[in-house]
Structures are given as structure tokens and as C-alpha cells.
Amino acid sequence: MAPTTISDEALMLEFQGGSREAFEQLFARYRGPLYGYFRRRLNGDQRAEDLTQDTFLAVIRAVDRYEPRALFRTYLYSIGMNLLAAERRKQHRDSPPVTPAPEPATHGAPDAALWVRQALEKLDESEREILMLREYEQLSYAEIAELLKLPVNTVRSRLFRSRMALRGYLEPARKLHDAAGQSEAPEGVKLAGAEGEAI
Amino acid sequence: MNKITHPIEPEELMAYLDGELPADRATATAAHLGECTECQSLISDLRGVSEALGSWKVVTPELQIPQAIAAARSESKPEPTRNGGTKALTWREILGVRWQNAEWIGVVAVVLLVVVGTVRFIGGNANNVFSQVQPSISETNSSANRDQMAVRASQEVRPPATSAEGKPPVNFGASQRDKSVVAREAVVNGPMIIRTAQLSLITKEFDQARTALEVALKRHRGYVGDLKIGGATGSGRTLNATLRVPADQLDATLSELKALGRVESESQSGQDVTSQYVDLQARLANARNTEQRLTDLLRNRTGKLSDVLEVEQEVDRVRGEIEQMEAERKNMSNQVSYATLNATITEDYKAQLQVVPPSTSTRLSNAAVEGYKSMVDGLVSVALFLLENGPSLLLWIAILFLPARLVWKKARRSFAQ
């Protein structure tokens, strides 16, 4: 028999009823994905940590008002999205922009995914967001549609467009990366890598 | 790509890869992919993009659950923070012992699952293992195999975001998860073809042909679905029959029937319903699973009366669907196992020349009747004309009478002078 997994919504309702264990389970499920969500969109891992924590605290504070009308996951990312938008507004107001943290966001070689990030940067903003929500947050089309307030068909067509565009961008970027890997990576590429650790 | 050579849109291919296609389209897409290298190449490209994106990994720091959560839960007002928003706590200060234990329990649970799954897999129950273990893997977000994206996406528990009434969604996501698994499990032995034949014969011996038809039908274990015999005087009789014979006996039956007369026309057709049948089986199995889960839910859980009623309504709805699909499945099976043969047998009628003319008295009486009829018809026609045009004629006469009279008088006077 497979173990029965309690749904996020049921856990949230249990948490509403006062169960701390329920929240701990939700936290365990979503701390990594949520941190990844912020980290890939912001420079600096400290802000990503803070915003992850802020998101969970927002969930805690709004727990009494929570109604399971939508998936908890969509609910959580919608809070995250609002916090991210506020953070970006704040960064935009404060000039010069926040200096990026020296630690790279990638795992393994520092510029292992540099070419991927550079290719993503070339995409249209809304298409990029849809693609990232699908690929990294692994949301379904319907969830993305609900989160971004778009029709599902629009999500699907934009996702297709972005993947096709990315296919075109990635091929030369991959070749460049491979060439840089064979000989020593040029200085310019390394600098770009430090700046392009988040989109 | 065009619709003629590629019945599947490129976006649908992508949705197939993401596990976002409905079962029927997914079946059609899988079939098309098996034979289209261009679409296979597109799928490969899409996979390549996903794999490339997967290379951007983020290392999650040692995030710990806030100790202050219990306090925050009981607080009514948010604490002021350095950003003017909620207070950012350090992860270290909120480390809870319980979370460390939970991590260990999670690791042990995954190990147990893998062990149990392996044992059952060796025991030959591979499909069950996948259907049970896979969801738990996806739910813990530990699945990183991009090649299994489609399988993962379809198996992941994703209940509908919002019910139409805005009620709490009942977790029916498992039915979505099971659908693709069941669809793959649904095995049909060979293609399922609904065979239909049409045969039109002309025979001189109509009665013998009819008897021979019934005998042949009996011999091949068939039955008459519908049979009509008719024919006007002065023409041959016609037999129209819809016969049902076992599909494997159709050819033999046709051969026998063709010997009953001269074949005027013959046609055969076959409709492949394999994919529809597989899809139907999958939907049926899913509906049964859903019914079982709902029944278990009713039996094991307690809750508000409104929730219970809602679940009961859902059970009724699912049962209705099951019965409907069951009937559809039986009908389809019946159509496949019994071929339909539409037979038409026409009698080769020889018209007789009428040599005896009618008698004189009959001809006189007929002429009298015809004369009377034409007289009545004439009177009726006049009456109808007067009724239709009389009022307007009277009106014109009334209008033109005085001027005509004056003209007439003047003319007569001048003529007299």
C-alpha cells in the first residue's frame, strides 16, 4: 500500500485548526521550491531567504482568513509573486541597484548555467515568467493561468513560443559555452556570469 | 507542419510532453509520434530545452521553520519589521527539534517505500508499484528525471483549482493521476474493428432465397436485426434485412448469400475503434477508482452534513457516469464482435402483358362518370371565379356606370342630331 499523503489544502485547514505539525509539513514541502523561486528572480541569496520567510509568515498571519478555494500551491506562489513585485519596486526606487551577492546561485561550476540564464534574459518578460513557472516551479498550465490571470490557451501558446525561442537562443549559447569550457573562459563571460545570476 | 500530414498541433505535442493533454488526444498523439520523425524531432528539441533549463540549479540553504510560528499564529497583529512588512526572523533561531525528526522520518519512509516497491516489482506487479510509488516521489519534489516529465506531470496530484461553486475542492486529483497509468495498462488484444457489409441481390426464386438466407444465418450463429418484405402489385418483391453475424463468420455468410442470385452491388467497410475503446476503459477504471475513494471517504471521514451531502451527490454523479460508460463499452464490444450485414434481395419480376380489353358497358359507364365529373368541375370553376372576382367587378361597375352613361347619352344625342 502506498502511504496516504495529506493534501496541502487539508494540511492548511489543520493548521487553521491549530496544528503546528501541519504547518511544519507544508514548510518542509515548499521551503526549497519557494527559495528557488525567489533566488532565480533576485540577486542575492539573503533577500531570497528573507522573502521565503516573509511568504511563510504571511501565510501564518492570514491563516484565519484562508479558504481552500484554490490550490495551496497557487495561493503560496501568489503571495510570493506579490512580495517579489514589491521587492523589485523597492530595488527600482533605490538607486544604484543592490550590488549582487558574490555567491553564485548555481550548483556546481560557477558559470555552469550562465548560458541558460543569458538565453532566458532574452525572452519576453511574460513568456519567461510562464516558462520559469512551468520548468522550475513545475506548475500546471491551469495553475499558471490562475496565478497570472491569463486564459489557459494563452499560457500554452506563450509557453510554446518561449520554448521555441529558447531553443534558438540556447544552441549558439551552448556552443559558446562549450568552446569556453575547452579553452579558458574569457574574462568577459565570467563578469557577465557574476551579474547574470538572477533574472 | 500542416494539418494534413500532422494531425497533432506542435503545441499539443508540447502539452503531451507536459502531461497536459486529455487522454484521447494523448493516445492520438502517441500514435502519431510513433510514425512521424518530424514530430519526434520536435519532442526531442523540447526535451533538450527542459534539460538545459534544468542545469540551472539552486542550492537551498539550511532553512529552518520559524520557532516564532506558534507565537505568530496566536498573535493578531503583525510585528513591525525593518522593511515595513513582516518581521524577518533568522532561520537559526527558529530551528525546531521536531523538524529534524521529521526529516529523518521522511528519509526512512522513502527508503521503506523503495524497498516495498522493489519487492512488489519483482513479484510482477510492476504497474501497481509505479502507480503507487511515483506520486509520493513527485509530491516530495525529489523527482529530477526530466525524461519522465510527461509521466510525472500526469501523475502529480493536481486537483481542480476552484470548484464552480467556490466550494473547497475535494481531492479528486488522484483520478487525473491514475488516468494515464490506466490508459497505458488498458490492453486490447489486436485492433478492434467494427465491420459493416452491404449486399444487394436479384433473384428469380424469391421464396427460396429467403429460406436459404435464414438457414445460412442460423448456420453462422447470426440473427436478424431487422427484416422487411414489400412490393407493389405489378412489380417484384423486395426483402430488406439487417443481419448481425459474428465478425469471423461475415466472409462465409457473404459467400453463401452471394450464391442466392445475381449480385447487383456489394461493399464492405471497417471502422477502427481501438483507441476509443482503450480510452473508454481507462475512463471507466478511473471512474470506479473515484467511486471507491469517495465511498471510503464517506465511510472513514466525519465532517459537516453539507460536506457529506456534497460527497454523496458526487458519488451519485460518478455512478451515473460509470453506468453510461459501461453501456457504451458493451455496445462497442457488441458492434465489434458482431458484424452488420445489410442485405437487399429483389425479385426478378416478369411483367404480364394485359390482353383482355375492358367491356363496352364499362367504357360507357366510365365515360358517363367522366362527363358528369367535368360538368361539375366547370360549374365549380365558374362559382369560384365569381366568388373570387365578383366584389371587385361590382365595385368597378359602380364606379364606371355614371361616366359610361353620360358618354353614351352624349354619343346618342350627337348621333340623333
Image: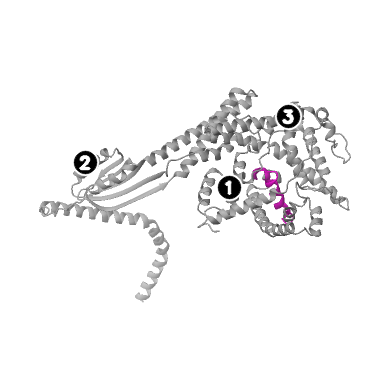
Q: Amino acid at mark 3?
A: Ala
Q: Which residue is mark 3?
A: B102
Q: Is residue A149 visible?
A: no
Q: Residues within 10 Å of mark 3 (few under 14, many from 20)?
A: some
Q: Which residue is mark 1?
A: B16
Please tell me which of labels 2 and 1 falls first in the chain. Answer: 1
Secondary structure mostly seen in magenta is helix
Q: Is residue A42 visible?
A: yes
Which residue range is magenta in the image? A120-144
Alpha-carbon span between mark 2 and mark 3: 81 Å
Q: Is residue B92 left or right of residue B148?
A: right
Image coordinates for residue B27, horizontal then vertical, percent: 52, 46
* In the depicted structure, whether residue A44 falls above or below residue B109: below
* In the depicted structure, whether residue B111 falls above or below residue B3: above
**Image quadrant in which the C terminus of chain B is located:** bottom left
Q: Chain letter for mark 2, please.
A: B
Q: Chain letter for mark 1, please.
A: B
- Residue at point 35%, 54% (across, down): B387
Image coordinates for residue A43, horizontal then vertical, percent: 81, 48
Q: Which numbered disc, 1 or 3, marks the residue closer to the eye?
A: 3
Q: Chain letter for mark 3, please.
A: B
Image coordinates for residue A155, horizontal then vertical, percent: 66, 49
Alpha-carbon span between mark 2 and mark 1: 56 Å
- Secondary structure of the residue carrying tag 2 is helix
- Secondary structure of the residue carrying tag 1 is helix
Q: Which residue is mark 2?
A: B211
Q: Which numbered disc, 2 or 3, marks the residue closer to the eye?
A: 3
Q: Is residue B91 left or right of residue B403?
A: right
Residue B200 colored in magenta in the image:
no
Q: Amino acid at mark 1?
A: Tyr
| Front one among B2 and B406 | B2
Q: Residues within 10 Å of mark 2 (few under 14, many from 20)?
A: few
